[in-house]
Amino acid sequence: MTLVSELVLTRNQLLQLARSQENSDFTAPLQRLSHITSDLQEGVMKTRMQPIGNAWNKLPRLVRDLARDLNKKIELTMLGADTELDRQILELIKDPLTHMVRNSGDHGLEMPAERRAAGKSETGRIVLNAFHEGGHIIIEISDDGKGLAADRIRAKAIANGLATEAELAAMPEAQIQRFIFRAGFSTAAQVTAVSGRGVGMDVVKTNIEKIGGTIDLKSTAGQGTTFTIKIPLTLAIVSALIVESAKERFAIPQISVVELVRARRAGTNARGDGEENTIELINDTPVLRLRDRLLPLVSLSELLGLEPADTSDGGAHIVVTQVGSSLLGIIVDRVFDTEEIVVKPVAPILRHITMFSGNTILGDGSVIMILDPAGIARATGVGAGADNKLMKPETVDETGSTDSLALLLFRANDTERMAVPLNLVARLENIPRDKIEYSSGAYVTQYRGKLMPLLSISANPDVSAPMQSLLVFADGEHSMGLMVDEIIDVVEDRLEIELASAREGSLGTAIIGGQATDVLDTGYWLARASRDWFDGGAADSGARKKRVLIVEDSAFFRNLLMPSLTAAGFKVTAAPGAAAALRLRDAGQMFDAVVSDIEMPDMDGLDFARALRASGPWRDLPLIALSSHADAGDVEAGRDAGFTDYVTKSQREHLIGSLRQCLANMAAL
Amino acid sequence: MTTATLERPETVSHGGEVYVTLSVAGQLCGVPVLGVRDILAEQPITRIPLSPPDIAGSLNLRGRIVTAIDLRTRLTLPPCEDGSKRMSVVVEQSGELYALLVDQVAEIMSLDGDLFERNPPTLEQHWARFSSGIYRLDGRLLVILDIARLLDFSNAN
């Protein structure tokens, strides 16, 4: 095989030479040589192809043994066993496949008694299915077992420090399930002789990625799990796009290239042909508007630490690559043609550079590095988590409001990118600088006939600009304006706080639109504004503050709710679960109202409400349900359980209104 | 591609060894001839971004990709002046080929074991690390390079 590869390379080299010399006597025989080489290559490839059934022939026995050891009834079905793939790849996927079938039998399928109880047939099914799809082989391994235990994965992810509770709360199920591909991640409750030793799916994933494949899974609780492996037909010869960046040439495997886009660099003048795209910068991060979506870009020369070439003509090419389900644009200076290349592994001393998947020799005899789009994506943080909406616009609808929300991006403190959930912002204003007045140590402005306090995120607000951008937050009767340098954009993204912040006024740092962004702690600024407000003059009504208990299992939502309720004038206590709340009750604590989440582990909100209504000092308190789901059925169920009102998590204003309403009703009684 | 074919000297003196001598920044060095696969004149070298500074790049040796190591950088010597032609000595280490970029390849020498001495203890650290000993020649000293240690990048830092 290596010989054939070499032959192909040499042929390419000769063809390249022949192309530069027109009308050479060599042209005709070279053409023939080229044809023969192609035929030979094809022939050799064919002889290397073996049916995948060869890798499967030990599985029936393995499953039989497994069934006996575990006292389960397992039926193995193998479809598409005659699908052919390269012998070398076959060898490499044999072990991962065996491991996964074993996993399915051990973790996936339940004991016969459990299956009967779940209304399934006693015999569990494992189905192996292999087929060709567009230059790839797809292998599916599915079982009709209990599916992945999302709770256990969550618990384990927190225990292993892979994600915080807040991050998990914002993650879609599918992403949580992918944690099983992380190292040292076994959710088997107990170690059996068969599996659960902590060496597992991460090794499988690494092995499959090593041969340029990908693995994904789909799991539905109670219905089973399906793993999908996608691997290239052959390793030896691939077609690659040759690009140039900073005068160095690189190859990008054609298979990961989706399209090529010509664009102008930011800050250069349009040449007037109208349809050219422009690379735009968000705080030095390049992005491209491609068909009404933002495509994250990365400059190859910067990524590889090369001297950027002279780009005075302003032209750039963007190679749009697909990694998993995310898209990433790689900015290069020039694009040459595609070439058949033979992938050779890089020298052992260079293996640690993850940007390259190999190297090869081009037709002109020069050595060229092959870029690994997966490695580049990892290095830039794309594809690590959230799916790119460019590829699958429908995922936004699927995942619902808790996963993806509208975020307002703005700039403050000169260059810092910050974000705030859009539904917390009442209005955006742009007021002339001379309308801002300075009164008793604070900035204020006259806004809709009232004085509104203004706060600035930066310690030294820039007072030279003629106009000032404001984010207006309104909370009950109070409103406040937050002075920011610039309002950038509104984006739809998941709010996953990756790094907690030590700084006041910021909840932490999240990746929004592929870039690190500070998330504004609205509660902090509101509290500060209202304190300033009270200090400024108007005295509090003097009434005793109403005490509210929040029962919510997610720390993220607790943190979101507490400041805003506090700012609205309530005295807030939070309990992380129904049990903790009941303990407070039994300890003799008294509140004026209780706000409880519906979806909680152990005891859910409905049971909690019934428990409160049944007996005890809290039985007549107003009880407000807080849930991410609020269709008519849910509301009905909530009322039946004893909730006074039912509010969705996203409607914060509504919650405060509802609280006031309930408390007023109580007072009237 | 100009490749000098090495002719093995007919007489190999007893107890001694045969070395390819080369010069790096004026210092005469030697590598055992049996470890040498090729001697190359100047070659086009493809830079490898993000690689350690010792690695000059890769080059194409009759269809094999060879990693080129800049011996000057490896021995923490000043880089050579731009434009000067540099030769390479190709050696093999556990199945992989490496090209050592040197200033000049001199000659093949068969040396008597009596002339061999261990490294003087005062030899600078970065030389002592890669040298297995020294031969006293007429008027010059020949530092014998240890290929295995030169190519061991596992604890490069």
Image (cartoon, rainbow, N blue to C red):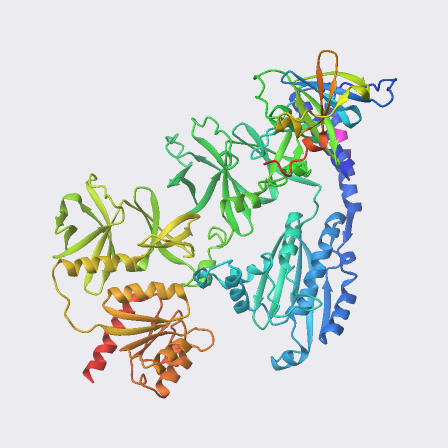
* Residue A366 visible, this angle: no
Residue A618 x %, y %:
31, 83
Answer with left or right where residue A251 lies relative to residue B28.
Answer: left
| Quadrant for the N terminus of chain A in the image | top right
Query: Which of the two residues, A616 or A640, is positioned nearer the viewer here?
Result: A616
Answer with left or right where residue A296 lies relative to residue A45.
Answer: left
Residue A421 x %, y %:
34, 57
For image coordinates 42% across by 30% down, the residue present is A314
What is the quadrant of residue B60 in the picture? Answer: top right
Answer with left or right where residue B35 lies relative to residue B88.
Answer: right
Answer with left or right where residue A407 lies relative to residue A104.
Answer: left
Query: Which of the two residues, A84 or A373, is positioned nearer the viewer here?
Result: A373
State which region is magenta: A31-36
What is the quadrant of residue A466 in the picture? Answer: top left
The answer to if A84 sits in the magenta stretch is no
Q: Is residue B97 above or below residue A292?
A: above
* Residue A48 visible, this angle: yes
Q: Is residue A372 above or below residue A493?
A: above
What is the quadrant of residue A432 in the picture? Answer: top left
Residue B84 x %, y %:
61, 15
In the image as oriented, which residue stretches furthest toward the bottom?
Answer: A615
| Quadrant for the C terminus of chain A in the image | bottom left
Q: Is residue B85 above or below residue A519?
A: above
**Magenta stretch prevailing secondary structure:** helix
How many numbered discs, if any? 0
In the image as oriented, which residue stretches furthest toward the top?
Answer: B139
